[in-house]
Amino acid sequence: EAGVVQSPRYKIIEKKQPVAFWCNPISGHNTLYWYRQNLGQGPELLIRYENEEAVDDSQLPKDRFSAERLKGVDSTLKIQPAELGDSAVYLCASSLGSGVADTQYFGPGTRLTVL
Amino acid sequence: KQEVTQIPAALSVPEGENLVLNCSFTDSAIYNLQWFRQDPGKGLTSLLLIQSSQREQTSGRLNASLDKSSGRSTLYIAASQPGDSATYLCAVRPAGGYNKLIFGAGTRLAVHP
């Protein structure tokens, strides 16, 4: 069974440029998460989707970040414009649902460097 | 607000040593606690998950314990090997609400031959 797929794996951009990350969750997983992991820190949740609906985006900086999950399958996270402080690893995870027994499976992440 | 702390931040040991990684959390109202492994350039791999009603879980050379009342968990690695070198992350799932994980900053482990 294929795991969570993310692309690109690495991205280097200059500040003020836009950038987008793509995630394809495990087939059949209804819940999708985007996390940001700063250097030397643990991942922090940015947004969670239940199918197509963003049910928790309280930690998403809405002035520059946006996300979508069309058709309730793959998802895109966008930053526009990027700032130096956005350099981090962006992790996508998925789970069957949001129940107590639902384990989150993580993708390899996209490492973003903003110059 | 739930906070998760991991000590030590980094650890370097010779091969063969038994070692303990520590995780503490401020709010004991949790559903479960999970230990992950993260290799450079890769995602997180779940190692052990302990439900709030459990005291410990074992998988091979790994043993994780949970003392929910004191807000502590330990990950014990027996007979460490160079292949165990990675960052180990602890995460709690708060009780109530949805499937949200709150992570510690991790312990970076290096096992040298």
Image (cartoon, grey):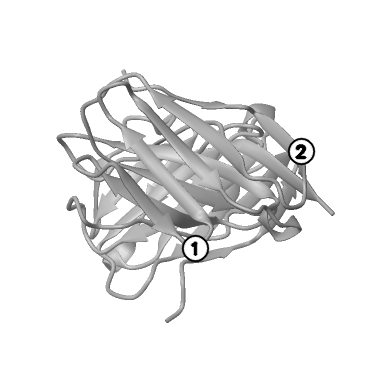
Residue sitting at x 62%, y 41%: B19
- In the image, residue A91 sits, relative to residue B52, either above or below, namely below
In primary-sequence order, the first of circles 1 and 2 is 2
> Residue B80 placed where, x, y %?
67, 52
Relative to B86, A76 lies left or right: left
Residue B102 is marked as: none
* Mark in front: 1 vs 2: 1
Relative to A65, A12 lies left or right: right
The amino acid type of the residue labelled 1 equals Gly
> Residue A81 placed where, x, y %?
59, 36
Query: How many residues crowd around disc 1 within 10 Å: few (fewer than 14), some, or many (20 or more)?
Result: few
The amino acid type of the residue labelled 2 equals Ser
B20 and A73: which is toward the camera? B20
Give the chain letter at badge 2: B
Give the chain letter at badge 1: B
**Residue at the spot of label 1:** B60
**Residue at the spot of label 2:** B12
Relative to B36, B1 lies left or right: left
> Residue A98 placed where, x, y %?
21, 52
Residue reaching furthest to the right = B113
The quarter in which the C terminus of chain A is drawn is top right
Residue B54 appears in which quarter of the rendering? Answer: top left
B111 and A42: which is toward the camera? B111
- In the image, residue A83 sits, relative to residue B49, either above or below, namely above
Q: How many numbered discs?
A: 2
Inspect this view and state whether residue A71 appears: yes
- Helix, strand, or loop for circle 1? loop
